Image (tube, coloured by chain):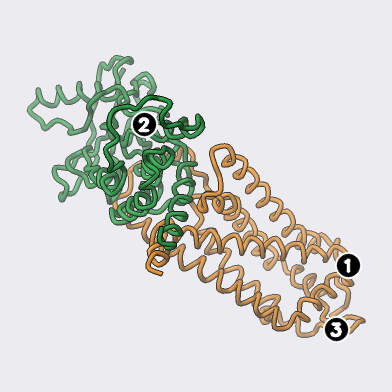
C-alpha cells in the first residue's frame, strides 16, 4: 500500500482525486437536470419521478452518501492543492498578464465556493424544506403524492431566490467550462489533437447545463408554468 | 526609441527588493531586449552605479539562460521566443516596461533579475537520464523507433529548461518542464527500462522543491519558447499513474 499512499500525497495523485470526484458530481448535475426538466411535462411527470426517487429507500441514501463523500473529497483535496499553490509563489508579480489562462481556470476556487454555498441553501430549500414556510402549506396532489411541481413553482416565484439560483448556476457553468475538459487532462486521457476538442466540448456542455437549469426559474417567473394548487 | 524601465532591484537573496525607474534613451529599434539592458548598464557603470544583474548566454534562443518577466509575461510579449529574441521594435516608443525576475518559491532570487533555477537541475538529477552506457550513435536500423514516437520525443526534447513555464503558471508549477523531461525518454527504447522509477522519482523531487500544482490553465505552453505542448502534462499524469500500478504490482 506504500505506493498508493505516495500516489495520493503527490501533486498528480491529488489532482486525480479532484478529477474523479469532479466527474461524479458532473454526472449528478446532468442527471439532476434531466430529472427536473420534467417540470415542463407537467405535474403528472415530475411528481411521479419524485415518488420513484423516494421509493428507492435505502438505495437513495447510498447514492446520497456516495455524492456527499465525493463532494467532501473534492473540496478537501482542492483545499490542499490551493494551499500548496499559494505557498509556491510567496512574492507576487508587480505586473502579471495572462496569455492563455481563461478566467474560468483562474477562478475555480471562488466559483466552487459559491456553488458550495448554493448547494447547502438549495438542499435546505427543496430537500429539507426549511427555507420557505409556505412549503408546509402544500397539500398532496390528486394521487396523494408530494406535489413537487407546485413546490418548485412557488419556490422560484420568489425573485431573490431565483436570482441567487441563476447566479449560482452561472458560476457552476464557469466552474464546469474548465472542469469538464480538465478531467481528461488530469487523468492523462487526452493528447495534442483531443485537447482543443475536449475544451470546446466541455464549454458547450457547461452552457447547455446553464440553459437547462435557468429555463426553469425563467419559465416560472414569466408565468409559463403555474402552480397546480392554490396555497 | 526611448523607454521608461521599471526594473526589479534586489541586492541579495535574503534582502528586500523593489522596482526602480530607469530611462533607456536613443535605443535602436533593432536592438534585442538584452542588448538594450547592456546599454542601460554601460551608462549606469559610467555614472558609478551598480549595473542591473541579469542572466544570458547564447542570445539566440537555444540555451535557456535568460529569465526575465517582461510586462508580466515570461520572456516578454513575443511568443514563442526567449527574452534574448525579443526586439525593441516590438514596443511602442515611449512605453513603460516592467522587468521582473521569474517568480516562484523554488526559484530564489540571487540578485536583481537573476534567480537560482537549481531546482530544475535537481528534478533531472532525480531520474531524467539513462543510467546504462548507450555508446555512440548505433546503426540507424538496429533499434527501430516508430516515426510518431520519434517525432513526439523530439518535440519533448526541445525543452531548453528555462523555467518560463513555472514562472508564468498561476500556481508556479513546473509540470510542463517535468513532463517534457519524462516524456522524451519514456517515448524512446533507450529510456524505457527505467521509465517506472524515473517518473516516480522526478515527480517526488518536483513536489519536494516547492513548486505548485497544475490546474490545467495552459499558461505554460503559451509562453514556452520551445513550444512544448501541455499535452505532455497529460502524458506525465498517465505515466505517473501507470508507474504507481507497475510498482505496486512489483514489476
Question: Quick one: which residue is furthest to the front in this view?
Answer: B142
Subunit under mark 2: B
- Chain assigned orange: A
Label 2: which residue?
B76
Residue drawn at the location 70% of the way across and 64% of the way down: A162
Q: Is residue B233 above or below residue A29?
A: above
Q: Which label sits on residue A140? A: 3
Q: Which label sits on residue A42? A: 1
In the rendered image, residue B161, in percent from the top left (x then y), is placed at: 31, 37
Seen in the image, is B87 located left or right of residue A152?
left
Q: CA distance from mark 2 to mark 3?
A: 67 Å
Which image quarter: residue A9? bottom left
Subunit under mark 1: A
Residue drawn at the location 9% of the way across and 25% of the way down: B47
Relative depth, front residue between A26 and B3: A26
For label 3, count other residues whose C-alpha is less than 10 Å away and answer few (under 14), some (14-19) or many (20+): some
Seen in the image, is A129 located left or right of residue B110?
right
Seen in the image, is B219 located left or right of residue B164?
right
> Which quadrant: the N terminus of chain A?
bottom left
For label 2, count other residues whose C-alpha is less than 10 Å away and answer few (under 14), some (14-19) or many (20+): many
Q: Using the rendered image of the protein, determine whether residue A223 is visible from the camera's viewpoint.
A: yes
Q: Using the rendered image of the protein, determine whether residue A96 is visible from the camera's viewpoint.
A: no
Q: CA distance from mark 2 to mark 1?
A: 59 Å
Q: Is residue B51 above or below residue B232?
A: above
Residue drawn at the location 79% of the way across and 85% of the way down: A137
Label 1 in the same subunit as label 3: yes
> Which colour denotes chain B?
green
Subunit under mark 3: A
How many tags in the picture?
3
Question: Quick one: which residue is furthest to the right in this view?
Answer: A142
Asked if the residues shown at circle 2 and circle 1 are in contact, with their CB atoms under 8 angstroms apart, the answer is: no
Helix, strand or loop at mark 3: loop
Amino acid at each position: 500500500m506504500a505506493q498508493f499512499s505516495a500516489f495520493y500525497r503527490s501533486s498528480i495523485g491529488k489532482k486525480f482525486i479532484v478529477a474523479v470526484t469532479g466527474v461524479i458530481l458532473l454526472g449528478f448535475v446532468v442527471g439532476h437536470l434531466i430529472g427536473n426538466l420534467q417540470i415542463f411535462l407537467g405535474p403528472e411527470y415530475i411528481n411521479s419521478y419524485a415518488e420513484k426517487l423516494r421509493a428507492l429507500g435505502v438505495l437513495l441514501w447510498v447514492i446520497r452518501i456516495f455524492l456527499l463523500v465525493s463532494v467532501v473529497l473534492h473540496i478537501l483535496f482542492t483545499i490542499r492543492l490551493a494551499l500548496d499553490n499559494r505557498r509556491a509563489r510567496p512574492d507576487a508579480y508587480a505586473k502579471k498578464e495572462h496569455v492563455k489562462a481563461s478566467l474560468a481556470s483562474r477562478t475555480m476556487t471562488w466559483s466552487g465556493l459559491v456553488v458550495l454555498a448554493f448547494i447547502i441553501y438549495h438542499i435546505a430549500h427543496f430537500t429539507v424544506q426549511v427555507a420557505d414556510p409556505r412549503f408546509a402549506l402544500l397539500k398532496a396532489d390528486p394521487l396523494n403524492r408530494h406535489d413537487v411541481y407546485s413546490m418548485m413553482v412557488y419556490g422560484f416565484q420568489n425573485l431573490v431566490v431565483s436570482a441567487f439560483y441563476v447566479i449560482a448556476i452561472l458560476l457552476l457553468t464557469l466552474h464546469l467550462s474548465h472542469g469538464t475538459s480538465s478531467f481528461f487532462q488530469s487523468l492523462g486521457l487526452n493528447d495534442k489533437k483531443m485537447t482543443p476538442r475536449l475544451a470546446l466540448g466541455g464549454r458547450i456542455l457547461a452552457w447547455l447545463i446553464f440553459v437547462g437549469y435557468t429555463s426553469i426559474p425563467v419559465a416560472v417567473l414569466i408565468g409559463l408554468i403555474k402552480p397546480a394548487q392554490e396555497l | 526609441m526611448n523607454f521608461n524601465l521599471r526594473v526589479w532591484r534586489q541586492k541579495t537573496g535574503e534582502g528586500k527588493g523593489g522596482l526602480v525607474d530607469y530611462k533607456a534613451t536613443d535605443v535602436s529599434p533593432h536592438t534585442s531586449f538584452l542588448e538594450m539592458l547592456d546599454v542601460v548598464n554601460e551608462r549606469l557603470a559610467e555614472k558609478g552605479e551598480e549595473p542591473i544583474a541579469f542572466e544570458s548566454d547564447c542570445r539566440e534562443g537555444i540555451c535557456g539562460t535568460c529569465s526575465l518577466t517582461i510586462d508580466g509575461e515570461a520572456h516578454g510579449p513575443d511568443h514563442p521566443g526567449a527574452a534574448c529574441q525579443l526586439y525593441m521594435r516590438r514596443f511602442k516608443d515611449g512605453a513603460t516596461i516592467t522587468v521582473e525576475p521569474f517568480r516562484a518559491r523554488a526559484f530564489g532570487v540571487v540578485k536583481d533579475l537573476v534567480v537560482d533555477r537549481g531546482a530544475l537541475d535537481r528534478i533531472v538529477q532525480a531520474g531524467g537520464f539513462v543510467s546504462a552506457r548507450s555508446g555512440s550513435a548505433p546503426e540507424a536500423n538496429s533499434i527501430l523507433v516508430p516515426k510518431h514516437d520519434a517525432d513526439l520525443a523530439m518535440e519533448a526534447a526541445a525543452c531548453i529548461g528555462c523555467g518560463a513555464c513555472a514562472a508564468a503558471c498561476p500556481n508556479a508549477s513546473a509540470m510542463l518542464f517535468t513532463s517534457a523531461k519524462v516524456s522524451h525518454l519514456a517515448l524512446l527504447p533507450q529510456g524505457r527500462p527505467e521509465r517506472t522509477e524515473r517518473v516516480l522519482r522526478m515527480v517526488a523531487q518536483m513536489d519536494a522543491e516547492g513548486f505548485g500544482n497544475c490546474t490545467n490553465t495552459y499558461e505554460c505552453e503559451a509562453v514556452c519558447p520551445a513550444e512544448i505542448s501541455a499535452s505532455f502534462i497529460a502524458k506525465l499524469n498517465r505515466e505517473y499513474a501507470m508507474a504507481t500500478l507497475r510498482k505496486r504490482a512489483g514489476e
